[in-house]
Amino acid sequence: MKKRLVAVTMAAAMSAALLAGCGSSGTQTQENGAAETSAQASGNGEEAAGETAASGGENIVWAGWSGEEEASRDIFQRMMQTYRDETGNDVTWVGWTWADTAQQLLIRSQGGEQLDIAQVDIGIFNTVQQAGLLADLNEVLGEDYMKETFQQSTLDVGNVDGKQYGFPWSMASISMVYNPEILAEAGWEEVPTTLEEFEQCLADIKAMDPEIIPYAVSTKDDTCAGDFMPWLWTFGGSLYGEDGSVTVDSPEAVECVKWYQDMLGKGYIAMDVGRGDARQLFAQGKVAFYDDAVLAKGQAVSNGVAPEDVVNVCQAMLRPVKNEGDTPQSTMWGHMLVIFNSSEHKEAAAELAKTLVSDDVALEYFEENGMPPVTNSAAELDEVKNDPYLSTFSASTATARLEETARMTNASEIKSIITEELQYALLGQKTAEEAVAEMGSRMNSAQ
């Protein structure tokens, strides 16, 4: 059985922070001179939380981090106003930095402060779910509604042992992006779809410009293990079996590691490259392919690509498959909404969740911040279907899988093992067989 979080221990360890840093109010962080929200998380704003709203409706507390960010602050205000106008309820935003959100949600829950609904990513979700804080949304919203509204792959991210603790909000897979200009210069007008084609494309790029890294797959830090997983699946392998046993020591994994070694030997990939490095090099036109989430376009712009040029140098693609007809592999990425067991306003919180994924609101969020809509109805909108970048990510997301370490509290340890053994193989310190065998042995010891 994989290691699980001991919620009571974690909550107890945070008691000091609760007493020292939280007090009776003021958990909101307003960074970089952020303007106050319409209902502040300190002073009169949060004191009003939980009381009957002026309109006679309910007043709920929504927590997270994106509403604190400059790029999202205005649209979060509009989202909340839409909810107020549609329901007659009120909503108070309580925000922190992303790095503080998981801890603050636990502290706030332990302290008995009102907390109805929160924004979480996959890692934060695991923390609060394993602490036993979340309501089953199949009970709050109805299982039929959930299945009729969302793709099963997005529901799976928030489903644990048959209970739906996470509400899909904005999700996409971590797939592959590429530079069309580099491919065209190397003679490729279409992206490769099979491994054979992919390797030929990488060879053509290398021959065209030896200074370009054809494929900046991650070879360091946790992102190395993250990139390795979908390639392992592509070769038919896995880290774990359905019963939780370690299955990585397999012929399929050996074949995958040998493929990595061959790619490095031919100069198609490089050592000491992580996700951040790949993003910077990609923006500089020094990388043809790399793996990223849907925010890759925004990352390219933030790393120096002119906004008007980004569509010419950053497009999405499905991961090449080993055999024609195979399913392209990718890992799931994105944000969910969760409702807390302690909430006295679960139905009102559910209405906010529905508002946030409604077509009009979700489309505005996509147009302003690039966060993709998740509902089946939004997928049919012309604005979504006609956007080749987003539609490719949507196609990839439909068959995406949760990282195999995502539900594990020692995920970082497992990812470090994978990264270290893969690096040993790439550096020639171990054969592929030796690296995979040791990977399996160390993962078994970490169980």
Image (cartoon, helix red, strand yellow):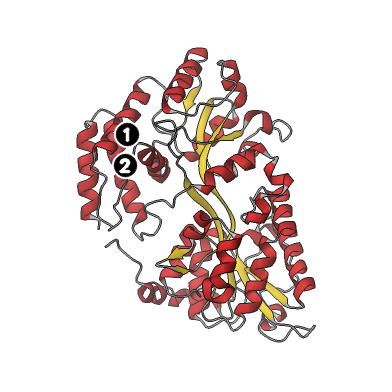
Residue 93 point in image, percent of width and height: 67, 70
| Residue drawn where x is 71% and y is 49% of the image | 381
Badge 1 crowding class, 10 Å Cα cut-off, few under 14, some 14 to 19, many 20 or more, is: many
Which residue is at the front of the view, 335 or 283? 335
Q: Image height check: is 173 above or below 21?
A: above
Label 2 close to label 1 by CB (< 8 Å)? yes
Question: Is 6 left or right of 346, judged from the image as shown?
Answer: left
Quarter of the rendering containing residue 224: top left
Question: Is 114 left or right of 332, judged from the image as shown?
Answer: right
**Could you tell me the amino acid type at mark 2?**
Gly
Badge 2 crowding class, 10 Å Cα cut-off, few under 14, some 14 to 19, many 20 or more, is: many
Residue 284 point in image, percent of width and height: 59, 28
Residue 307 point in image, percent of width and height: 71, 36
Secondary structure at numbered mark 1: helix
Residue 78 point in image, percent of width and height: 76, 63
Q: Image height check: is 251 above or below 155?
A: above
Q: Which of the numbered marks, if any, corresponds to residue 237?
A: 2
Residue with the mark numbered 1: 256
| Residue drawn where x is 63% and y is 42% of the image | 390
Quarter of the rendering containing residue 349: bottom right
**Could you tell me the amino acid type at mark 1?**
Cys
